[in-house]
């Protein structure tokens, strides 16, 4: 690994731990100087073995992390799910951050679940993710609707509102990292060691709304679970969007809530009510209504031209009040302190 790669990994690990250089020096009991850490992070030099051991211990991470051999992050998928909006330097930093986070996350899981003589079997039984709709191909809108309905069925989620999408994903074994992403990226997804699904979300309230956060999580879920044939009219991102919309608000629920398979017009007041219950934006509702041809193209265009494009943040159009948070890692942290 190059000095540059090492420097990125050291800096990301330090920041993930919330440590200043001075605090990191303290945690090494003075084995490393602040000047040395600064030189390591600038790529000017690399630590010798004893210094590396001290840094790894202070950061509670394996030495293999610094060589990039601890956890294999699927970087090509990160590149794909960022829609090509991240530079290679940004991708390298995000890969380091995910590698650090995933190693610590998995270590906590193993500490909790690896308690018997057959610890490996018990570990995998409790936490190894299984794709409940593996092999489901999505080429068309109808495929996306079917995949969304099938996943809800396999996850016993019914066809009504999902109170917390993020908590549902965590319960099903998907690991979610909340971190700051570049301005034009709201979420990404990838795999660790080809078997642990990871979703990265920028959850800052100044950047996203609750409804967009829920939609982004469902969109990234599609990237993780579905198969996308190359020959399709819709590009992959649009297929993920269709899945996300109908996962949050199923086709059957939409028809029942709207009272008919066909509507001459949609009222803002009724969509505000549905937004507050289903946690899905007005724009996504209008998209879905057009997708299933509940409304005419003329009415769809009117909604976007006259309403949505003039109020893209949907200010004053209701709000989903149930909080979207993540908590599994925090709960595991509390449990490991008891062991």
Image: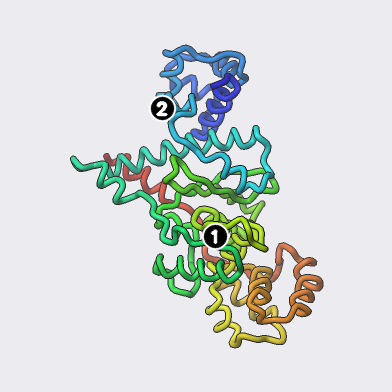
Q: Earlier in the sequence, mark 1 or mark 2?
A: 2
Q: Given contact means CB atoms under 8 Å apart, are the residues at marks 1 and 2 in contact?
A: no
> What secondary structure is found at the residue carrying circle 1?
helix
Q: Quadrant of residue 41?
A: top right
Q: Tell me, for residue 62, which label it has, or none.
A: 2
Whether residue 209 can be seen here: no
Q: Element under label 2?
A: loop
Q: Is residue 55 left or right of residue 277?
A: left
Tag shown at residue 322: none
157 relative to 86 in the view: left or right: left
Q: Is residue 106 above or below residue 37?
A: below
Q: Nearer the viewer, residue 174 or 73?
A: 73
Visible in this render: residue 332? Answer: yes
**Residue 154 location (% of width, % of height):** 40, 66
**Circle 1 residues within 10 Å: few <14, some 14–19, many ≥20:** many
**How many numbered tags mark residues here?**
2
Neighbourhood count class around disc 2 (C-alpha, 10 Å): few under 14, some 14–19, many 20 upward? some
Q: Residue at x 46, y 48 (%)?
A: 197
Q: Which residue is mark 1?
A: 218
Q: x and y percent of residue 182 in the render?
A: 67, 43
Position of residue 266 in the picture relative to residue 275 (left or right) = right
In the rendered view, tell whether residue 90 sits above or below residue 152: above
What distance separates the C-alpha of mark 1 from that of mark 2?
33 Å
Most extreme residue toward the left is 117
């Amino acid at each position: 690994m190059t000095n540059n790669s090492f420097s990125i990994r050291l800096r990301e690990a330090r920041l993930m731990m919330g440590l200043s250089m001075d605090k990191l020096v303290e945690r090494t009991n003075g084995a490393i100087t602040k000047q040395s850490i600064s030189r390591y992070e600038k790529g000017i030099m690399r630590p010798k073995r004893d210094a590396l051991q001290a840094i790894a211990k202070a950061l509670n991470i394996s030495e293999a992390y610094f060589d990039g051999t601890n956890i294999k992050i699927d970087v090509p998928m990160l590149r794909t799910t960022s829609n090509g909006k991240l530079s290679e330097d940004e991708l390298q930093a995000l890969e380091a951050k995910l590698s650090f986070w995933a190693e610590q996350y998995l270590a906590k899981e193993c500490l909790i679940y690896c308690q018997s003589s057959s610890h490996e079997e018990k570990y995998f039984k409790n936490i190894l993710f299984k794709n409940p709709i593996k092999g489901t191909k999505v080429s068309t809108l109808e495929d996306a609707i079917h995949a969304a309905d099938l996943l809800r069925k396999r996850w016993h989620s019914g066809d009504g509102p999902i109170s917390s999408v993020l908590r549902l994903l965590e319960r099903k074994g998907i690991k979610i990292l909340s971190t700051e992403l570049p301005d034009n990226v709201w979420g990404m997804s990838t795999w660790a060691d080809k078997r642990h699904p990871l979703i990265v979300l920028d959850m800052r309230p100044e950047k996203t709304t609750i409804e967009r956060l829920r939609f982004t999580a469902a969109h990234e879920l599609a990237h993780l679970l579905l198969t996308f044939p190359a020959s399709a009219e819709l590009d992959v991102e649009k297929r993920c969007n269709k899945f996300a919309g109908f996962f949050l608000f199923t086709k059957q629920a939409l028809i029942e809530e709207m009272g008919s398979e066909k509507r001459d017009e949609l009222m803002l007041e009724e969509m505000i009510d549905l937004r507050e219950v289903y946690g899905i934006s007005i724009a996504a509702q209008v998209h879905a209504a057009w997708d299933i041809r509940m409304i005419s193209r003329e009415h769809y265009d009117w909604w976007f031209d006259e309403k949505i494009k003039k109020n893209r943040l949907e200010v004053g159009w209701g709000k989903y009040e149930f909080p979207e948070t993540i908590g599994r890692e925090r709960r595991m942290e509390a449990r490991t302190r008891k062991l």
